[in-house]
Image (spheres, grey):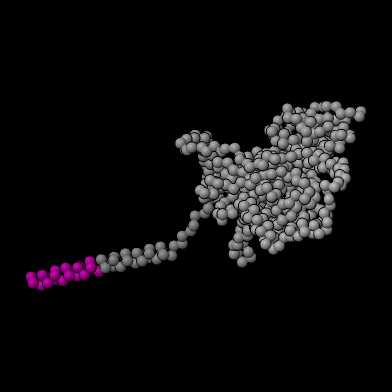
Amino acid sequence: MEDRKNREKKNREKAYETDENSARKQDLSASDKRGAFQESIISEQIKRRPINKYRLLRRSAVTALLAIIFGVIASVTIWILEPFLSKWITKNEPVQQRDAVHFIDSGDEVTPQEVLSDYMNQEADLESEEVTPVTTAQIPLTDEQIDALFAKLILDQKDYRQIYMSMAAYTREMNKSIVTISAITSDVDWIGVTEQISKQASGLIIADDNIDIYILADRAPLAGAQSLKVRFSTGDVTEGRLKAVDAATGLAIIAVKKTDLPSDLASSIPLATLGSSYASIGTPVCALGSPMGSSGSIAYGMISASRSTLEYADTADAMLQTDIVGAPNAGGFLFNFNGQVIGVIAPDQSKGDVKGLIWAYGISELKSRISAMCSGTPTIYIGIIGTFVTTEANVELGVPYGAYVLRTDMDSPAMLAGIRTGDVIVRLGDIPISNYTDYVNALQTFDVGEKITAAVMRKSQQQYVELEYIMTARASGIIVEED
């Protein structure tokens, strides 16, 4: 009995060992399988999915098309809504109206005919003057008496000092209306360093309105500037902007906002007084600005030669020659000794036989174009190069007073209408013309594109007959810049 129990016990232990070994084998088999599986995963290679170029191109095209459609829709929407948005934004903002441009004109302008007539009358008076016989009441002075009189007129250094101090005080007063304009540009040198280049020009304060003041200057030193700095005689410096350029003379108008100036300067702008450039030979003048090439330089002299009219279409620009030897880059303005501007120094000083003498554009001929440039309106172009009719031509040859036509520009409105050399314009529209200056001034009363009726006198069979021609006004070469 006991033996049987022992055998059963041994059998149970053996069966248990057999089950345990079987389970251990199963665990080892599973472990081997997992290791093999992990090893297969580790050794697996991941390949990149091939790119479908056609699909990529199609998606790019669709994206670009959607961007274009969106841009077009946005542009159309802004274009439609912009006027309404602008009105809504600015409806409560007050709009400042610009007043008429204000000049100071001496008003003592004379015509060339009057100057020539006065000169001829003086010559006639000298020729017709008779020598008055000497009477007992007219005893000639002795040499001693003459020497005594001239001895009283001898000037010493105190007198010269007083004269020059008086002239210096006068020029200081005139210099209040002169400014220095600096044209600033930036440049990068070969090592990458940025430097500022500045060129200077003299300017003349000639007009103002309730918004801006206007400065006349030579355009050449200011060309290509990225910014303009205007320095006043008070030392104040502010920004300026180019408003207009005259293609014939190269003169420019620089505008400065009054709000950018100190209140005391803005309330009392030192405007220059524009005089008459029909000055007689020998008239004393002073050149201010930069006649010697540097800003603030001064020179004294006189008008030394008769005027020669420049042959520009529809202008009456005349040149004043002085006996002042200036710099090759001279600039500035001529003043008479009545406090009036009579000329604008021309940049090219090689017009005469004597090199280096300062020439100037006569201010009388520039007034109408200066006014047009300040107001921002283009002048009118017809294409007539003309001159004045002298008294001799009128008396001896019977040429009527008016604007004498020297020639017309090719394909200009005047040439296309039929006006030719030798005609004398006596009326533009309803405005009578008695000289070439009248013609230039009358032309500025018309608008671009307007039909202008010109009445001319043409010589036919030893007499002048009146003819009428209709021309269409064009815009001149004045470039008006955006504000």
Residue 65 seen in the current view: no
Quarter of the figure with residue 127: top right
Which residue does the image show at 66% across and 59% down from the upper left?
A: 162
Which residue does the image show at 86% across and 44% down from the upper left?
A: 132
Query: What x and y, as percent, mark residue 287?
Result: 70, 54
Quadrant in which the N terminus appears? bottom left
Outermost residue, front side = 136
In this rendering, is residue 70 above or below 345? above
* Number of numbered tags placed on the structure image: 0
Quadrant in which the C terminus appears? top right
**Chief secondary structure of the magenta span?**
helix
Q: Is residue 126 left or right of residue 80?
A: right
Magenta stretch in the rendered image: 1-21
Which residue does the image show at 76% across and 32% down from the upper left?
A: 433
In this rendering, is residue 101 above or below 460? below
Which residue does the image show at 83% across and 38% down from the upper left?
A: 390
